Image (cartoon, grey):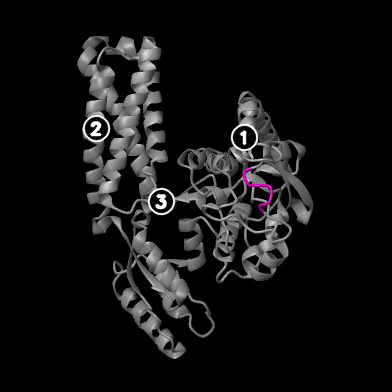
Amino acid sequence: MIRLFNVYYPTRTIVLLLCEALIVSGCFLLATVLLLGPDTYLVLNYEYGGVKIVGLTIVTLLFSYYFDLYEPQRISERWEIYFRLLLVLGFLSFLLSAVIFLFPDADIAHYVLLLGLVFLTAALVAWRSAYEWIIGREMFRERVYVLGAGERAQTIVALLTNRKDAGMEVVGWGGMLTDKTERKEAFSTALIGFGETKSSVDRVIVALEDRRGELPLRELLKLRFNGVVIEEGGSLLERLTGKLHLDGLHPSAFIYSEGFRVKPSQQIARRIVSTLTAAVGLLLFLPFFPIVVLLVRLSSAGPIFFRQTRVGLAGKNFTVYKFRTMRTDAEAAGAKWATKDDPRVTRVGMFMRKTRLDEVPQLWNVLRGDMGFVGPRPERPEFVPWLTEQIPYFNLRHMIRPGLTGWAQVRYGYGATLAQSREKLEFDLYYIKHMTLGLDLLIMFETVKTILRRQGAQ
């Protein structure tokens, strides 16, 4: 896997993206050459044709990204890939038509874009079919043995089975063996068998809940010296899922980890970026402010803004500001999480929650320093003691400023139950461990996708 901005991406996904960048630019370049012939050099170099093709390539890849074409785990059926691919080409066609109509000089040359789109449609459909065939070949898959026989091992096996983009094929695992002696014998026998032939296994993933008396060290060492990769199960889960799984997470994972370092210089840079982004956001939203105020006023009786106490940096409380989306008597019976299709939410409020318009006043919290633009979402003080008691390491969320958006928001969504809060914490811990300015910028970029897709809101 390839690490970018402290996030791990499967190598084959990066290869897919780079190949499609070449295909898109190549199709429009081919159309230019066929239609312009000897004038191609002049158009590309003196009429900004090359720049226009690069722009077309970037826009096409962005459309593909927003339709999840580089995240196959979010696509359930193979036919859906081609359907989304056609949607990308359709949106690209409409966008190019609108741009050329409004700005005729943006065209490369007469009929070049039309012919390029024809080439691109055929090329992308053919390429995706070829790509699916290529990654299905055994020579491009890594053979993996999962050394474990409990729920953790079962989770890894299920994940690798569903994540074809990971490029790993499970050739065996301990199953659900319950007897400790039986498990160790089964592990040793399997590893000895793999050691007899070098090509039988490429990687062993250690996924034991309790390694004392079960870990076959001698066999693992022999495989390691024969070139087989030995990897701890938690590391694999972290790379593939983008979260720290609380099951099996011990204090040593924090003590000896390279992450979880809050550097002053890093925090200053993040603070500057958050402040500038919040200031620009408020200025851009200013023309729409009267419209939103009017909609909130007409939706139901009550104040425009909603104030609520949240827990911030180092466990200190602060007041968060939002546009009101619920009735004024929404919590007459006490504090509780919002739920899907919550009857307390007004019609206008539901739209504002889906589009995240209700969160805009929190940009003021960012300017004040109560929050950062990126970080774990601040929780209510009514829930924090209970969540801290029920979920291990929950208080680690308060190591840094809470955020307007965060890794959990772009990768998971809203949590309204204890189990969901636990899973959100796993994403938050991953962010705190790998926190960098680059990761913040990536989260900001993915937040746009989350808003446009209207995902993760209640």
Q: In percent of the image, x 66 and y 52: which residue is there?
A: 330
Q: Would residue 221 be seen by someone viewing this image from the given angle?
A: no
Q: Secondary structure at mark 1?
A: helix
Query: Where is residue 106 shown, x and y percent of the image?
Result: 38, 14
Query: Where is residue 441 shown, x and y percent of the image?
Result: 57, 39
Residue 44: image quadrant is top left
Q: Nearer the viewer, residue 301 or 238?
A: 301
CB under 8 Å between discs 1 and 3: no
Q: Nearer the viewer, mark 2 or mark 3?
A: 2
Query: Where is residue 12 shown, x and y percent of the image?
Result: 35, 48
Count numbered badges in the picture: 3
Mark found first going from the N terminus, 2 or 3: 3
Q: Nearer the viewer, mark 2 or mark 1?
A: 1
Report which residue position mark 3 lands on.
10
- Callout 3 amino acid: Pro
- Callout 1 amino acid: Leu
| Above or below: residue 330 compared with residue 19 | below
Specify the segment rendered in magenta: 325-330
Magenta highlight on residue 147: no
Q: Nearer the viewer, mark 1 or mark 3?
A: 1
Q: Nearer the viewer, residue 47 or 380?
A: 380
Q: In percent of the image, x 22 and y 27: which residue is there?
A: 118
- Callout 2 amino acid: Thr
Circle 1: is it few (<14), some (14-19), or many (20+) Cα within 10 Å?
few
Report which residue position mark 1 lands on.
298
Return the mark for residue 121: 2
Q: Secondary structure at mark 2?
A: helix
Distance from the alpha carbon under mark 1 to that under mark 3: 49 Å
Q: Could you tell me what secondary structure mostly forms the magenta stretch? A: loop
